[in-house]
Image: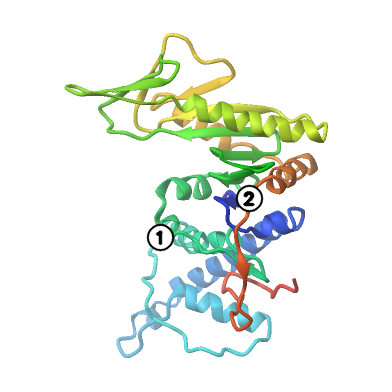
Amino acid sequence: MAQLIKLNDYISRYEWNIYRYPTQFIRLKQDNWKKLYQMWMDQKEDEEALSAPEEEPLSFWSKLKTRIKRDNETEIEEPLTKEEILPLSEEGLKYYFLDKLYPFQLKWATSTVTDVSFINPGYYHDSTLKFFLQRFPDIYLVMYNPVFQIKKAVIDGEIIGISPIGIEIMSLLETKPHQSIIADGERTWVIQGDSEERTMINPLISLKRTEQIINNILLLEDIEFPIQKSVISRTNQIMFTREPYRTNLIDSSSFEKWFQNKRKLLSPLKNQQLKVAELLLKHCATTSVKRPEWEDDDDSFYTQSEED
């Protein structure tokens, strides 16, 4: 599950300490998956308890919260809820777990212990953001439409994935499956269907602008790190006479190969990767307010409380 280090102009825990939170996220995710999986196995073996008519079984997530608090020797202050549906298969349990982690990722990308940003509720249902977070490995650090602060100007950026081996700037194009994307114009591209045709702004314009911003930031610190640009369509064919310079055009016929190459990348987090992420975060705009004193930062995903 990729890590969301920057969302729009919201404050992020990763910009607070990029060397701490990526490894902490991986550890917390692994620890909690093991706990959840063990409870799932225990429940499968205890069929009699699950089928007892007089007692409704508690949800996995409620039980996970109970076990986490018990492990920390913390008293349970709230009654457990019974609203969740039990996943029947291991595959279903994985998706269940990922869906439960998604709000937690948004929390880390919109708050610190002392400050908080007001998130657009639409991000909780953003299928594109979910795709990049839930389908890519933990070692990918994602900046989702970050807002860069360059001197006095604010500039919107494209989706940025920072892996141990380089940066990929991505533009995702989604239209009706039967339509084709004609990538020929300098300023506009054409979306062509059976009986309709319309134009769209050439996504290379925004990709190149984001690439130039990143290049300038890295040059300031004399850092070399590979950068590539990609236009991606999971559902449509992209037609072109010549592939753009240093830009991958990934359409429905080549998407699966590209996607699997990303998932197969085996590498620990790298110091250079974290350094690059730190530099980019330092040049992003951030809008936030102080967290109210009475607001609790506790979350059931934690296996231990945070000290800072």
In the image, what residue occupies the spot 42% across and 80% down?
A: 58
Quadrant housing the C terminus: bottom right
Q: Nearer the viewer, residue 249 or 37?
A: 249
Whole-angstrom CA distance, mark 1 to mark 2, is 43 Å
Q: Is residue 298 left or right of residue 88?
A: right
Q: Are marks 1 and 2 in contact (CB under 8 Å)?
A: no
The amino acid marked with disc number 1 is Ser
Residue 54 in the image: x percent, y percent? Answer: 32, 90
SS category of the residue bearing label 2: loop
**Given the current orientation, which residue lies at the most extreme right position?**
222
Question: Residue at 60% across / 84% down in the picture?
Answer: 294
Q: Which labelled disc corresponds to residue 134?
A: none
Find numbered disc 1 in the image and state the secondary structure of the residue it sits on: loop
The extreme front residue here reads 152
* Residue at 38% over, 70% down: 86
Q: Which mark is residue 285?
A: 2
> Mark 1 — residue?
89
Mark 1 or mark 2, earlier in chain = 1
Q: Is 247 left or right of 290, judged from the image as shown?
A: left
Left or right of 61: which side holds 51? left
Residue 95 x, y percent position in the rendering:
44, 57
Give amino acid for label 2: Ala
Image quadrant where residue 228 sits = top right
The image quarter containing residue 50 is: bottom left
